[in-house]
Amino acid sequence: MTVRYPIIRPTLPPFEEVLADLRAVWESGFLTAGENVRALEREVAALTGAADCVAVANCTSGLMLALKVLDLEPGEVVVPAFTFAATAHAAVWNGHDPVFVDCLPGTMNVDPQAARRAITPRTRAILVTHIFGVPADADELAAIAGDAAIPLLFDAAQALGARYRGRMAGALAPLEVFSMSPTKVVTAAEGGLITTSDPRIGERLRRLRDYGKSKDGQDMDTIGLSARLSELHAVVARACLRHGEAYIARRTALIARYRAALGGLPGVTFQEVPEDRTTSGNYMVIRVGDRAPLPRDALYRHLAERGVQAKKYFWPAVHRQTAYRRWGAAFDGRLPEAERAAEEGLALPLYGHMTDAQADDVTAVVREAFGRESAR
C-alpha cells in the first residue's frame, strides 16, 4: 500500500549547507571525535545552559552511560511506564530493577507523587522522560530526589529546545540525554547528546563512550561502550541545530493547526502543555477515548488504508512488553493512566517541512473516519 504521508520525515537543511564541511571531514581522514564533535558539544551546552555536553552514537547508549557514570550500587531505578522502552533498558543494562510509575492524565509525564511513593531503601535513581518534548515537573521531581538523597536524570530524547519555567531542557537535572535520530526535530541522522551540570562527569563520560579507556588511552580503567559520534554525523547535527528554532516554530504551528481541525471530534483529546513550559513539538499525538465513535486501532487502520502512516505511541506500556514480564507483571493493572494513555495514543504525521495543505489532508482523513462511523 502506498504511503502518502509517512509518520515522520527528517527535516534537513539544504545539502549545500553541509557539503563543504562533509568534504573537509572526508578528505581529512579524521572521522570520529574531531573538531565538529567538539563544536557540537559546545553549541549544545551554550544552547541549553548546561556546564558540559558529550556527544554519543545514540540516545540509548547515552542513557546507559548516564547511569553508568554515577557508579550506583545495584538496586532499583524509578522509571515511567509510559515511555519508549530505551528508558527502562538503561536501568536494566546497568544491573538495576525498573520500578514503573504512573503518568499524569494531561501531560502524560510521570506523576511526581507516584515517583515519591515508589521510593524504597533499594532505590538508586529516578529516571524520567520528557514525554513528546514537553518537560516533566523538574522542580518537584528534584525535590523528591533530594529528599531521598538519590540522583535525578531525564530522558530528554524528544525535548531539545523545550523550556521549563524559563530554563532549557538540558539544564533541568545533573544529567539529561537527548536523541538526534531521524525522528527528532534536530537530527544527526543518528546520534545522541548527554548534558551535565558537572564538567568532571563530562570528562568521565568521554572516556566511557570510548570503551572506558584511561586518560592516556593505553589501559581500560572502567567498562564502557563504543559510543562515539562520527564527524560526519556531527556536521549534519550542527547544520540542523542552526535551524532548530525555526523547525520548532514550524512544528508548533502545525500542531496548532491539527488541534484546531480535530479538537471538536468526540472523544479526541491532546497532550496538555502547562503554561510554565514550552514543547519541542516533536510529535503530534491525539488520544482517542471512550467517547469516540471508533476505537484508536480502527482509526489507525483507516488511516493506513488511505496512505496515512500513524503510530501507536507508546504502545504497549513498557511494563506490558514481553522483555519486561519479569518486572512488569507486578504492575499490570496498577498503572491506570499509563495503560490508558498507551491504549488511546496515536501519533499523526508531523515534520518541519510539512505544508499546511498536507496537514489538512491528514485531518480530513481523520474526520472522514469519524463521520463515517457517526453516520452508522
Image (tube, helix red, strand yellow):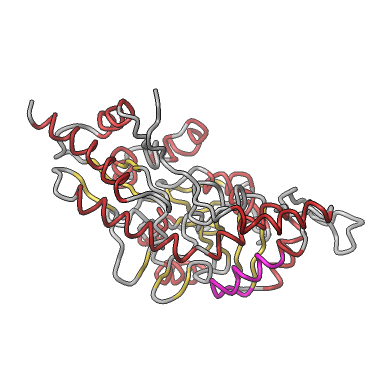
Q: Is residue 121 left or right of residue 375?
A: right
What is the x, y in percent for residue 304?
33, 29
What is the x, y in percent for residue 43?
62, 70
Q: Choose between 272 and 257: the one closer to the eye.
A: 257
What is the quadrant of residue 14 in the picture? Answer: bottom right
Q: Residue furthest left?
A: 375
Q: Residue furthest right?
A: 218
What is the x, y in percent for residue 27?
82, 53
Q: Is residue 374 inside the magenta stretch?
A: no
Q: Is residue 239 above or below residue 321?
A: below
Pick the quarter of the image with the N terminus: top left
Residue at the (59%, 51%) spot, across then down: 59
Residue at the (44%, 68%) spot, across then down: 144
Residue at the (77%, 51%) spot, across then down: 223
Q: Residue furthest top?
A: 1
Q: How many marks?
A: 0
Q: Is residue 43 inside the magenta stretch?
A: yes
Q: Choose between 105 and 333: the one closer to the eye.
A: 105
Q: Is residue 270 left or right of residue 78?
A: left
Q: Choose between 211 and 185: the one closer to the eye.
A: 185
What is the x, y in percent for residue 332?
37, 37
What secondary structure prevails in the magenta region? helix
Q: Is residue 254 above or below residue 303?
A: below
Pick the quarter of the image with the C terminus: top left
Residue at the (54%, 46%) spot, across then down: 182
What residue span does the magenta drawing correspond to? 38-51
Q: Is residue 106 left or right of residue 372?
A: right
